[in-house]
Image: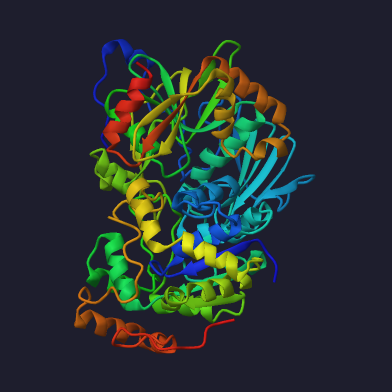
């Protein structure tokens, strides 16, 4: 069992921390059946086959068809996924597919589509709760180091809420980030950067130098305090986004933003980004990738002081 | 052939960026200045990864090389459909097909390929400097066909690229009937920039005159680019690189590339070198340019 990277936390926080593994795994050796982590009422089913095309749908992107409340996508050689009504995901595996890869895309893009269909916001972000209980969503495209800095923050006692895609809903008075993961996906060099031995960790999928790093995780939903968009730069700079422009920031950080219209969710998307923008700060933080990861973690920590 | 991308293709350190600066100057026209940090990078580096992640159903970071290449032709088609006019795209990959047999850059959305080639002695020295490595390592890289692609240890901002060897890179484009290719030697571009750039820009469908090109060449003098990099930096420079615009002159290998390494380059690439008029003593002979 790989060791956990986060230090022991103070007792007062213990009740909020997952003490048992989160129901999230969909072990690759077993059929994919059950609700998605952090999305009560959802249902995943492994099926023998799915249609090649989505009835009434249109091709909106490579290997992706959509219509209102339904999206079908395929990763050739792996699986086909049909996501409907914000409730169900059917997955049909290609014969001899790498089941770890099937799970990866189920918990990634398929889950993202389902969140869209629910009229909620799938943020391309790793989200954590700071020791003062303020939640921060670190938003940026791949390869900018959000999982690495998330791992560095976990070492300081922060709790992971979600990696890659964070489900954010609006409860009428605040933005809620839903827990979905108790491990981060890190490349081998990132493992080394945060002092972990990659050889002791589970591979994300065969043939890839990418590993699951277990972390301490939040067990309950968290009020989202700030969404930070990272930018690559040789200098550090932090810019607070004006309240009127926060919704735009959230829109730009939406997972597969172009799926919104095809799924008939434009009004919902506008509504939820506007609502979240009322209570969630927005910050542009320059300096990703070009500085030691601990310095970037310091800058993020300053944003929730 | 119609389409929206003009591929500026070359093995690394062969004049690609200089060519893009000149073409950008021509696109803007008149007296409008062009900064090296204003070049269109929508389809390269981190932007190419972001574009892939925007259009493919799953992120490239979770895919193998083959899976990424499987999606790329359709991703490029989707990107090309959004382009109004044409977009210059920097390419260091060798021309290749994916596992389904499709060209990675779909010929139906490539308006023209401008291929640039440079004497491998100079490429080796420039590559070593650029990657902050030894000339020996650079010479090894230039012979590597990239067929055994090992999983990478870190996620680079760029999508994976496959340069192939210097010789394969050259021939994959220059002999490729799938694309309309116009090519030039770096040494000829340096000796007669106006004539060469006028020929290449015209082939790419740019309505430019000799006078336009003269202005563009003057405004993008190599020393000017160096000066700008010193003052403002260059956002496309690799992190390990000390300086991107090192020396624009042909023949900079002299004193930096020993006889054994020159022999190795001739051994590895002699056939293609002879075809291009690149001599074993590092000099360059006259040859007929492409159309």
Total number of numbered labels?
0
Q: Residue at x 64, y 47 (%)?
A: A73
Is residue B42 visible from the viewing direction of this image? yes
- Give residue A178's position: percent from left, percent from top: 50, 23
Q: Hey, which quadrant is residue A145 in on the image?
A: top left
> Looking at this view, is B159 or B261 the one in front?
B261
Up/down of A111 relative to B169, above or below: above
> Looking at this view, is B136 or B197 the one in front?
B197
Q: Residue at x 54, y 82 (%)?
A: B175
- Give residue A237's position: percent from left, percent from top: 38, 30
Q: Residue at x 54, y 58 (%)?
A: B25
Is residue B104 visible from the viewing direction of this image? no
Is B57 displayed left or right of A202 in the figure? right
Image quarter in which the N terminus of chain B is found: bottom right
Q: Hey, which quadrant is residue B145 in on the image?
A: bottom left
Up/down of B278 relative to B2, above or below: below
- Give residue A91's position: percent from left, percent from top: 60, 44
> Looking at this view, is B271 or A55 the one in front?
B271
- Give residue B218's position: percent from left, percent from top: 47, 63
Is B262 displayed left or right of A181 in the figure? left
Coloring applied to the structure = rainbow
Residue that extends furthest to the right in the rendered view of this protein: A56
Image quarter in which the C terminus of chain B is found: bottom right
Up/down of B153 relative to A15, above or below: below
């Amino acid at each position: 069992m790989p060791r956990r990277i986060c230090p022991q936390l103070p007792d007062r926080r213990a009740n909020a921390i997952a003490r048992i593994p989160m129901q999230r795994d969909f072990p690759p050796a077993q059929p994919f059946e059950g609700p998605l982590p952090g999305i009560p009422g959802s249902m995943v089913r492994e099926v023998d086959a799915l249609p090649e095309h989505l009835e009434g749908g249109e091709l909106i992107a490579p290997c992706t068809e959509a219509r209102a409340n339904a999206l079908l996508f395929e990763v050739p050689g792996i699986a086909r996924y049909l996501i409907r009504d914000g409730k169900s995901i059917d997955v049909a595996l290609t014969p001899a597919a790498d089941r770890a890869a099937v799970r990866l895309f189920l918990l990634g893009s398929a889950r993202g589509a389902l969140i869209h269909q629910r009229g909620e916001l799938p943020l391309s972000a790793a989200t954590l709760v700071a020791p003062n209980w303020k939640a921060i969503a670190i938003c940026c495209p791949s390869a900018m180091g959000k999982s690495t800095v998330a791992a560095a923050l976990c070492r300081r006692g922060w709790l992971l809420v979600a990696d890659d895609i964070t489900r954010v809903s609006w409860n009428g008075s605040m933005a809620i980030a839903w827990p979905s993961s108790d491990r981060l996906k890190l490349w081998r060099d990132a493992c080394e950067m945060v002092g972990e031995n990659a050889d002791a960790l589970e591979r994300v999928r065969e043939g890839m130098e990418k590993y699951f790093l277990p972390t301490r995780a939040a067990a309950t939903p968290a009020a989202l305090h700030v969404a930070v968009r990272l930018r690559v730069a040789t200098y550090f700079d932090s810019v607070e986004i004006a309240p009127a422009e926060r919704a735009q920031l959230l829109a730009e950080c939406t997972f597969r933003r172009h799926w919104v219209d095809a799924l008939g969710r434009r009004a919902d998307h506008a509504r939820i980004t506007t609502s979240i923008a009322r209570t969630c700060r927005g910050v542009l933080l320059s300096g990703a990738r070009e500085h030691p990861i601990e310095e970037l973690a310091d800058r993020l920590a300053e944003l929730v002081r | 052939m119609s389409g929206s991308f003009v591929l500026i293709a070359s093995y690394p350190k062969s004049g690609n960026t200089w060519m893009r600066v000149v073409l950008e100057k021509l696109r803007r026209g008149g007296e409008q200045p062009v900064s090296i940090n204003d070049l269109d990078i929508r389809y390269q580096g981190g932007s190419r990864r972001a574009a892939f992640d925007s259009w493919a159903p799953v992120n490239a970071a979770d895919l193998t090389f083959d899976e990424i290449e499987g999606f790329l032709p359709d991703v490029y088609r989707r990107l090309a459909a959004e382009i109004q006019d044409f977009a210059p795209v920097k390419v260091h990959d060798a021309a290749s097909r994916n596992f389904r047999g499709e060209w990675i850059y779909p010929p139906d959305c490539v308006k023209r390929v401008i291929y640039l080639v440079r004497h491998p002695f100079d490429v080796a020295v420039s590559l070593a400097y650029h990657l902050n490595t030894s000339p020996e390592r650079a010479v090894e890289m230039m012979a590597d066909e990239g067929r055994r692609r090992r999983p990478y240890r870190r996620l680079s901002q760029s999508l994976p690229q496959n340069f192939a060897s210097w010789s394969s890179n050259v021939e994959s484009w220059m002999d490729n009937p799938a694309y309309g290719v116009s090519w030039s030697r770096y040494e000829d571009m340096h000796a007669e920039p106006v004539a060469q750039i006028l020929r290449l820009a015209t082939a790419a469908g740019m309505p430019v005159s000799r006078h336009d090109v003269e202005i563009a060449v003057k405004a993008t003098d190599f020393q000017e680019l160096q000066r700008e990099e010193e003052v403002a930096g260059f956002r496309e420079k690799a992190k390990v690189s000390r300086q991107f615009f090192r020396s624009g002159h042909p023949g900079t290998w002299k004193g930096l590339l020993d006889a054994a390494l020159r022999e190795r380059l001739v051994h590895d690439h002699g056939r293609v070198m002879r075809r291009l008029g690149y001599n074993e003593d590092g000099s360059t002979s006259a040859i007929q340019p492409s159309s």
